[in-house]
């Protein structure tokens, strides 16, 4: 199935420029809602053909600035290097599945 990887400013374009689905999770270690989303994203990676790319905004400010990330967790969905949709804030798994299903079907 899918995988969870760490991404950085230096490899962001390589990670997202894929013919597969890539869900970028902009997060920070001090962010409580980010910690709530992490196990949900790991579960989704185990159920779908998707790469979850985790980007720590504290040490990778260029990518988050490039996409205008103002709040975290910020989830950006990519396909073929193009951003398809974005969502900000923690969401339960059923809500995240519904959001992904709108694009991945």
Image (cartoon, rainbow, N blue to C red):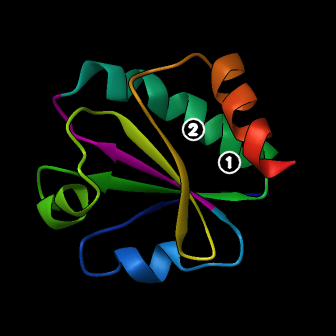
- Residue pictured at 23% horizontal, 55% vertical: 64
Q: Nearer the viewer, residue 64 or 93?
A: 64
Magenta region, residue range: 22-30
Is residue 23 part of the magenta span, yes or no?
yes
Seen as rendered, the residue at the extreme right is: 105
Q: Is residue 69 above or below residue 11?
A: above
> Could you tell me residue 46's position as x and y percent?
74, 46
- Is residue 20 left or right of 13 when viewed as pictured? right
SS state under label 2: helix
Quadrant of residue 9 within the rendered picture:
bottom left
- Residue pictured at 79% horizontal, 38% vertical: 101
Label ID, residue 95: none
> Could you tell me residue 105's position as x and y percent?
88, 48
Quadrant of residue 22 within the rendered picture:
bottom right
Q: Is residue 17 above or below residue 63?
A: below
Q: Is residue 63 above or below residue 30?
A: below
- Residue pictured at 45% horizontal, 83% vertical: 14
> Could you tell me residue 72's position as x and y percent?
28, 33
- Indicate the quadrant containing the N terminus: top left, top right, bottom left or bottom right: bottom right
Spatial CA span between label 2 and label 1: 6 Å
Q: Which residue is mark 2?
A: 41
Q: Are marks 2 and 1 in contact (CB under 8 Å)?
A: yes
Instruction: Give neighbour class at mark 2: few <14, some 14-19, many 20+ (Cα, 10 Å).
Output: many
> Could you tell me residue 80's position as x and y percent?
63, 76
Instruction: Give neighbour class at mark 1: few <14, some 14-19, many 20+ (Cα, 10 Å).
Output: some
Q: Which residue is mark 1?
A: 45
Majority secondary structure of magenta residues: strand
Is residue 31 part of the magenta span, yes or no?
no
Q: Is residue 29 above or below residue 21?
A: above
- Is residue 74 left or right of 103 when viewed as pictured? left
SS state under label 1: helix
């Amino acid at each position: 199935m899918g995988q969870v990887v760490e991404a950085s400013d230096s490899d962001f374009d390589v990670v997202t420029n894929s013919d597969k689905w890539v869900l970028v999770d902009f997060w920070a270690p001090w962010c409580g809602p980010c910690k709530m989303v992490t196990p949900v994203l790991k579960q989704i990676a185990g159920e779908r053909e998707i790469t979850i790319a985790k980007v720590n905004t504290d040490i990778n400010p260029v990518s988050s600035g490039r996409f205008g990330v103002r709040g975290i967790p910020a989830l950006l969905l990519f396909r073929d290097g193009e951003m398809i949709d974005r969502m900000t804030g923690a969401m339960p798994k059923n809500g995240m599945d519904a959001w992904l299903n709108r694009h991945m079907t």
